[in-house]
């Protein structure tokens, strides 16, 4: 009886850790996909944007994305159009300065 309880505890802990790991991978993927988006997002990305985990760019009109300058998270960048599935987003991509 004691061995079954120990085995059940270990299996439940492994299942819990696998759920936490897959959830964190999903959150990280969503952040990498939508970080710097210049419009208000809906759904789970909108929830992350509302909590401050996603930076919002300032490209101006999200429906008319130009290659102009912008800022995201206090860093300079440029506006770029990106497609996620069938959705188009105007994203402020930070400019990386090479050393």
Image (spheres, rainbow, N blue to C red):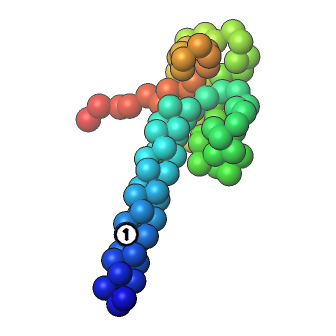
Q: Residues within 10 Å of mark 1 (few under 14, many from 20)?
A: few
Q: Residue 18, percent across and down?
A: 40, 58
**Vertical arrangement, residue 18 with respect to residue 3, above or below:** above
Q: Is residue 30 visible?
A: yes
Q: Residue 95, percent across and down?
A: 44, 28
Residue found at x 69% / y 45% = 47
Residue found at x 65% / y 40% = 44
Residue found at x 57% / y 24% = 91
Write down the residue under mark 1: 11
Residue found at x 64% / y 45% = 48
- Helix, strand or loop status at disc 1: helix
**Vertical arrangement, residue 81 with respect to residue 50, above or below:** above
Q: Please state, as top left, top right, bottom left or bottom right, where the C terminus lies in the image.
A: top left
Q: Nearer the viewer, residue 11 or 38?
A: 11
Looking at the image, the residue that sits furthest to the left is: 99
Q: Nearer the viewer, residue 20 or 29?
A: 20
Q: Is residue 71 visible?
A: no
Q: Nearer the viewer, residue 13 or 79?
A: 13
Looking at the image, the residue that sits furthest to the front is: 1
Q: Residue 16, percent across and down?
A: 45, 65
């Amino acid at each position: 009886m004691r061995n079954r309880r120990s085995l059940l505890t270990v299996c439940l802990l492994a299942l819990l850790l696998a759920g936490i790991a897959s959830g964190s991978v999903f959150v990280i993927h969503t952040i990498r996909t939508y970080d710097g988006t210049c419009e208000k997002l809906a759904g789970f990305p909108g929830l992350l944007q509302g909590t401050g985990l996603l930076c919002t760019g300032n490209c101006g009109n999200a429906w008319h994305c130009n290659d102009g300058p912008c800022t995201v998270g206090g860093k300079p960048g440029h506006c770029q159009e990106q497609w996620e599935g069938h959705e188009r987003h105007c994203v402020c991509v930070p400019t990386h300065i090479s050393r």
